[in-house]
Image: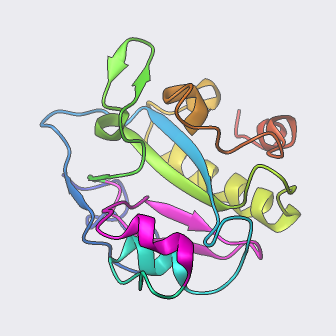
Amino acid sequence: MGMPGDSAGWLPGARHVASPNHDERPAGTIIDLVVLHAISLPPDEFGGPYVEALFTNRLDPRAHPYFADLQGLRVSAHFFIDRGGALTQFVPLDARAWHAGVSRWQGRERCNDFSVGIELEGCDTRPFEEAQYATLAGLLAELFARLPALGRERVVGHSDVAPGRKTDPGPCFDWGRARRDLPR
């Protein structure tokens, strides 16, 4: 299945780094949800190659004590927005990225099947950067244009689809700021 404007499902303007951590979406799937996440590796530290290494199965478990617990973990997201606002795409839109895990939204299980996962470099204790909100707004506008089942009410946090298990994008994510810039 190809995406409008790009048969490979890759957005122009994003840096492309292919993650092996994806598979096919179920046949006939309509993509109608965006799940926002926050990630920092090591926790509460920004910059460095570690998120990309995690999403491409190259994270060295000896590089930091925290990474030992991540050994063998196979995760990805469609997109990653770093603190400076740079956008990287890891999985084509027509594929299922492994980002939400055990999840449920409006009575539907397995949110990875029908969602786009966006990771923002961040944590529960520090505000996100203006550059990240700007990139997120542009990305969401592009996604809304390409995927007509998406809309303002279809952008949720990981904590919304995995309550009690996940907290991200966390209390420092400014939903009011993010929603103000969403396409109408």
Q: Give the residue at x 73% y 73%.
A: 45
Which region of the structure is painted magenta?
A: 64-93
Is 9 within the magenta? no
How is colour applied across the structure in the image? rainbow
Q: Give the residue at x 58% y 27%.
A: 160
Q: Main secondary structure of the magenta part?
A: loop
Horizontal placement of 85 versus 97: left or right? Answer: right
Q: Image height check: is 6 above or below 17?
A: above
Q: Is residue 16 visible?
A: no
- Find residue 62 and report its image quarter: bottom left
Q: 180 or 123, which lies in front?
A: 123
Is 74 within the magenta? yes
Q: Position of residue 57 (x, y in %)?
A: 32, 77
- Find residue 44 and report its image quarter: bottom right
Q: Image height check: is 23 above or below 45?
A: above
The number of discs equals: 0
Q: 136 or 117, which lies in front?
A: 117
